[in-house]
Amino acid sequence: MTRLKIVDRYDNGFTLDAEAKESLFGLLTHPDFLKEVCQQAGVEQVEFTELMFQPTPYATKTPKGMPTEFEPYHDSPDYVIINVPPNLMFKAKVFKPSRLCAIYRKLA
């Protein structure tokens, strides 16, 4: 029988060095990638907000799997949250954290 482990505390803080951040932001704002985000979101235009977070384990304090300060974006029809594709993180040389989410504003 497998037991679930309840996570009471989870450190979701992270920092990217300047070079990795510049590279990742460049990839996240590349016209081809923006087009892909638009297709998935069903809109014609999006804008990267430069807001990112590390997904968190689902818990009573984080029921949406994200830090609570980002939850308003989850429920908003004006924003889309994506999982940053692993190949983009690899290209930008971002290895820690291993997963990130990015927030885009829907423009049209």
Image (spheres, helix red, strand yellow):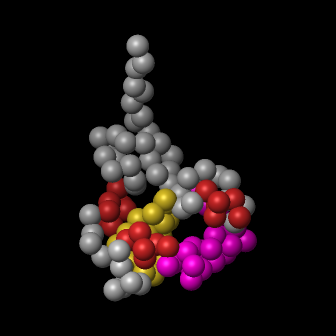
- In this view, the residue farthest toward the top is 1
As for residue 68 lying within the magenta part, the answer is no
In the picture, the quarter occupied by the N terminus is top left
Q: Give the range drawn in magenta.
A: 13-35
Q: Main secondary structure of the magenta part?
A: helix
Asked if residue 18 shows in the view, the reply is no
Front residue (pair 70, 28): 28
In the picture, the quarter occupied by the C terminus is bottom left
Front residue (pair 7, 46): 46
As for residue 24 lying within the magenta part, the answer is yes
Q: Residue at x 42, y 27 (%)?
A: 5
Q: Residue at x 51, y 46 (%)?
A: 11
Q: Where in the figure is residue 21, as x and y percent of width and height? A: 65, 70
Q: Where in the figure is residue 28, as x and y percent of width and height? A: 57, 73
Q: Residue at x 39, y 84 (%)?
A: 44
Q: In which quarter of the image is residue 14?
A: bottom right
Q: Quadrant of residue 73?
A: bottom left
Asked if residue 78 shows in the view, the reply is yes
Count of marks overlaid on the render: 0
Q: Where in the figure is residue 74, as x and y percent of width and height? A: 32, 62
Q: Where in the figure is residue 39, as x and y percent of width and height? A: 42, 74
Q: In this view, does 81 lie to the left or right of 17?
A: left
Q: Which residue is drawn at 45% across and 81% down?
A: 47
Front residue (pair 19, 31): 31
